[in-house]
Image (cartoon, grey):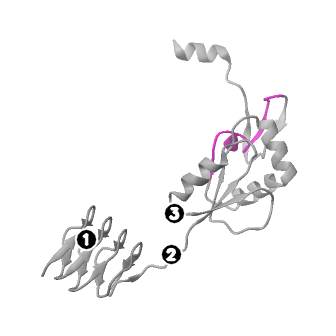
Amino acid sequence: HDCVLEDNVQVGPGAYIGGNVLIKKNSFIGLGSRINNNIKIGENCIVGSGSVVIKNIKKNQKFAGIPARKIWKKKIIVGVIDTGTSNIKSVYYALEQNDVKVIEIKKFKQIQIDAMVVPGVGSFKYVMERLKKTKLDEFITQKTTKGLPSLFICIGMQILFSKSFEFGETRGLNIFKGNVIKIPNEFNKKKLN
């Protein structure tokens, strides 16, 4: 009754593994699970806690239940707003590493997304001008007021406020009441000492 567990296989406490079982690398067998005899589990698989596996599982699958069945989970769709000022590809690649579908949004359109990221580097004024030109200011406001999970980075967060005084007075999205102002040099010197 040989069992083979390849590299980096993790088996939770109380799990039972029957005879003639092969579990390929990087797989996880949850707490109290049962893997019946003559089963092969592919690479990068997850078997949920308390599950009973009665048939082979192909690589990159998630199974759970009694008997264990494939978990059909749709990928989360994250919209990344193109503010025209940031390295949007860095955000794009970071999100892809977390197994989400990424959509780059360059102009206002009705699109179904599960979350939103608004990156930005540089000038508040330039970002707001670009967002207004592409009507993405309306898109961000609409999605934010509906409670869409969102991440705002740097200027992407500053534009949520009423206005900024960088390069003159510029109106923001006014989602948060308040102004973005430069920190006075005297403040910086006091904090450093």
Quick check: is 126 in the magenta stretch?
A: no
Identified at 25% across, 67% down, the residue is 6
Residue drawn where x is 81% and y is 43% of the image: 128
**Residue occupied by mark 3:** 99
Q: Residues within 10 Å of mark 2 (few under 14, many from 20)?
A: few
Q: Which residues are magenta?
A: 151-167
Report the side of 151 relative to 136 (left or right): left
Provide the secondary structure element on which disc 1 rests. loop
Q: Which class describes the residues within 10 Å of circle 1: few (<14), some (14-19), or many (20+)? A: some
Is 139 placed left or right of 73 in the picture? Answer: right
Residue 73, numbered label: 2
- Residue 51 makes an appearance in the image: no
The secondary element bearing badge 2 is classed as: loop
Asked whether residue 155 is drawn in magenta, I would say yes
Residue 9 quadrant: bottom left
The amino acid type of the residue labelled 3 equals Asp
- CA gap, disc 3 and disc 1: 24 Å
**Displayed quadrant of residue 103:** bottom right
Q: Nearer the viewer, mark 3 or mark 2?
A: 3
Q: Looking at numbered disc 2 in the image, what kind of residue is underneath it?
A: Lys
Examine the rendered structure and indicate whether residue 48 appears above or below residue 143: below
The residue to which callout 1 is attached is 31
